[in-house]
Amino acid sequence: MAETDISMSERDVPIVSAKEYGLPDEEIVAEIPIYLTHRIAKNLHLLQYPQRTSSVKTGVLNPSVARLKPIHGQIEMDIQLDVTSPMYSKERGRELGVGLSDNGRILDIQTLVSVNIPKSSNYMAGVFREGALHMTPIEKITQLQPSLKYLDRVAEKELAASKLDNDDDDDEDGKKEIKAQTIQVTVRSAQAEEALRQQQSSIAYIQQKLEEEPWSKLSYYDVGSEESSLVSSRLLARHTDDLVCKTTPDEFLTAIIGSIEPDVL
């Protein structure tokens, strides 16, 4: 589909007073043209950071590594931790660093992993430039939350070490008795095939396919960089010609948000 920009103007449509909707009447101080563009809509994602108490400012994240699984749309970013901070426990960092590697590395990074948020509405990114509002639909909303996979690796290594100790104790008592096992071969019925299809669509199957997909390296450009500015410029509509509106303002708003009639108690 070709890239298109849409301009919405109400210059030729009579303005409806707010009093007609039972709302307080206020003076209209300005009319702002709105331009809808899809230039980068398919690649525009909203990233949220629910674990952070304030907005993410320039240079705060600066991930050392960023990666993507394009088929499943999963994103990971490694953020460097300040291991020189007096609030950082190096002893605990060495214990948890086992979940990163076996060479004595301390836990010096925090990995943020994406969690897709179902869209309950249509969101847009807006840029106000030279008295006009340029709107681009957002393709996906994603939250970046801390990954705790390193804790799973620590637990796995502790379990493996404990199992090794138990096996050594069993070997001292003698060889284990080996029992013959009977293998039964069956042909799946139609019901079994259906059950298999349901299993393949289960969360476990989806998680398995996600783990199997290889990572692709991402380049991260912070706000204010030349690359970021170039992408931001594509949020502006290239065509600003007025369109001939075939619906009234009421019909247009009803089509995108439902009834606009005020609630009556």
Image: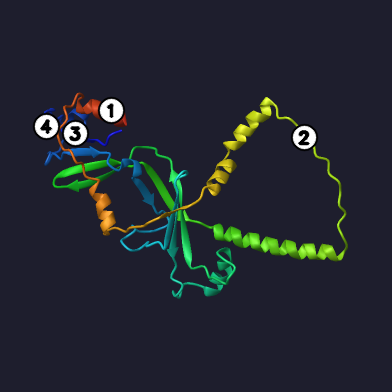
Q: Is residue 124 above or below residue 76?
A: above
Q: Which residue is most to the top?
A: 246
Which dot, 4 or 2, sits closer to the camera?
A: 2
Q: Would residue 55 appear left or right of 194 to someone viewing this image? A: left
* First of labels 2, 3 by sequence position: 3
On residue 254, the disc is 1
Query: Which residue is found at the position 37% from the left and 56% from the top?
Result: 219
* First of labels 4, 2 by sequence position: 4
* First of labels 3, 1 by sequence position: 3
Mark 3 surroundings: few (<14), some (14-19) or many (≥20) residues within 10 A: some
* 3D distance between C-alphas at marks 1 and 4: 20 Å
Mark 2 surroundings: few (<14), some (14-19) or many (≥20) residues within 10 A: few
Which quadrant of the view contains residue 120? top left
Task: Tell me, yes or no, whether the two marked residues, 3 and 1, touch with CB atoms within 8 Å.
Answer: no
Residue 231, position as x, y percentages in the image: 27, 50
Which dot, 3 or 1, sits closer to the camera?
A: 3
Between residues 16 and 264, which one lies in front from this camera angle? Answer: 16
| Identity, as a three-letter code, of the amino acid under mark 2 | Val
Q: Quadrant of the N terminus?
A: top left
Instruction: Please name the residue that numbered disc 3 is placed on.
Output: 8
Using the rendered image of the protein, determine whether residue 263 is visible from the camera's viewpoint.
no
* First of labels 1, 4 by sequence position: 4
Which dot, 4 or 3, sits closer to the camera?
A: 3
Residue 151, position as x, y percentages in the image: 57, 60
Task: Tell me, yes or no, whether the two marked residues, 4 and 2, touch with CB atoms within 8 Å.
Answer: no
The residue tagged with tag 2: helix, strand or loop? loop
* 3D distance between C-alphas at marks 2 and 3: 67 Å
On residue 11, the disc is 4
Query: Which residue is found at the position 79% from the left and 36% from the top?
Result: 184
Q: Would residue 260 appear left or right of 161 to someone viewing this image? A: left
| Identity, as a three-letter code, of the amino acid under mark 4 | Arg
Instruction: Please name the residue that numbered disc 2 is placed on.
Output: 185
